[in-house]
Amino acid sequence: MKIDWAAIGSVFGVSLAVTVGLVALFTLGISGLSRRERAVAQGSGGGVLAITGAYVCFAACAAAVAYGIHLIMAKS
């Protein structure tokens, strides 16, 4: 039996990069919600850009997860 170490390393690298990217994107979404809450608490107005950015980040995370599920289900 021959193990293709290059393929395993490639899969590991891509998985690590995508995982770190999704965590960073989700963190940006949480940060946007936090900034909006801070703006509302200070009475300085909406924070519309922060909430819009947060929703975009969460939508991108959901799309990435849905795409991953699609890839898994298409191969079955």
Image: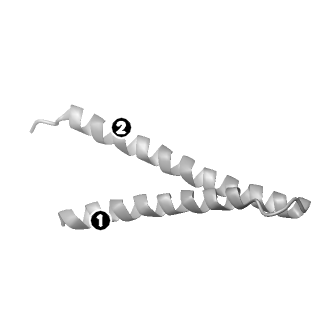
- How many numbered marks, from 0 up? 2
Side of 30 relative to 70 (left or right): right
Which of the pair 6/48 is nearer the observer? 48
Lower sequence index among marks 2 and 1: 2
Front: mark 2 or 1: 1
Mark 1 secondary-structure assignment: helix
Look at the picture and state if 9 lies above or below 30.
above
Residue where numbered disc 2 is placed:
13
Q: Residues within 10 Å of mark 1 (few under 14, many from 20)?
A: few
Who's the residue at 41% across and 58% down the image? 64
Quarter of the figure with residue 5: top left
Q: Specify the quadrant that holds the N terminus.
A: top left
Point out the residue furthest to the top here.
Answer: 6
Look at the picture and state if 12 lies above or below 46.
above
Which of the pair 65/56 is nearer the observer? 56
Residue where numbered disc 1 is placed:
70
What amino acid type is highlighted by mark number 1? His
What amino acid type is highlighted by mark number 2? Gly
Who's the residue at 36% across and 37% down the image? 13
Who's the residue at 42% across and 42% down the image? 16
Who's the residue at 55% across and 50% down the image? 25
Q: Position of residue 26 (x, y in %)?
A: 57, 54
Quarter of the figure with residue 41: bottom right
Mark 2 secondary-structure assignment: helix
Using the numbered discs, state the Cα–Cα distance from disc 2 to disc 1 in whole angstroms. 21 Å
Which of the pair 72/54 is nearer the observer? 54
Q: Position of residue 7 (x, y in %)?
A: 22, 37
Side of 13 relative to 74 (left or right): right
